[in-house]
Amino acid sequence: MSTVRDITSSATASQAASAGTQSPLMRACQQVEGLFLNHLMEAMDRPAFGEGLPGSSGATRLFRSQRNQAIADEMGARGDLGLAQMLHDDLSHRSGGVGGNEGAPDMNQTQGAETR
């Protein structure tokens, strides 16, 4: 059992060390992945019919919500789905163009379309 704790604590320590070296864009992308995972887990945890199991209290729902949030945050930080890396690659590629606006919509063109 101590081996599992050692692996977990060393993984957490290495993530904390690498978090300081990540770009703000990558951290934001990881947060988006965590948010997506949280919504996904909340939807999967929602009962299909009615209120759910008898005896399911508000405290149980709160615990499940907090559990889902913690798991989603951890999975997002690790990049388990790869969504954060894809977002980071796409956004950094778009901002890497001339003037930093390559691939961004033209605001004048967008505003003109809304008034029609």
Image (spheres, rainbow, N blue to C red):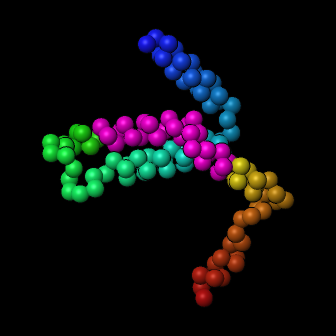
Q: Going by the picture, which residue comes out furthest to the right?
A: 98
| Highlighted range, magenta | 63-88
Q: Where is residue 111 in the image (x, y as percent from the top left)?
A: 64, 78
The one nearer the camera, 74 or 22, is 74
Q: Residue at x 66, y 49 (%)?
A: 86
Determine if the magenta segment contains residue 64: yes
The C terminus: image quadrant: bottom right
Q: Position of residue 113 (x, y in %)?
A: 63, 82
The answer, for residue 5, to whether it is visible in the render is: yes
Is residue 47 left or right of 25 when viewed as pictured? left
Q: Which residue is drawn at 82% across and 57% down?
A: 97
Q: Main secondary structure of the magenta part?
A: helix
Q: Quadrant of residue 78?
A: top right
Up the image or down, 43 lies above or below 55; here it is: below
How many numbered markers are drawn?
0
Is residue 47 left or right of 107 when viewed as pictured? left
The one nearer the camera, 95 or 35, is 35
Q: Where is residue 38 in the image (x, y as percent from the top left)?
A: 44, 46
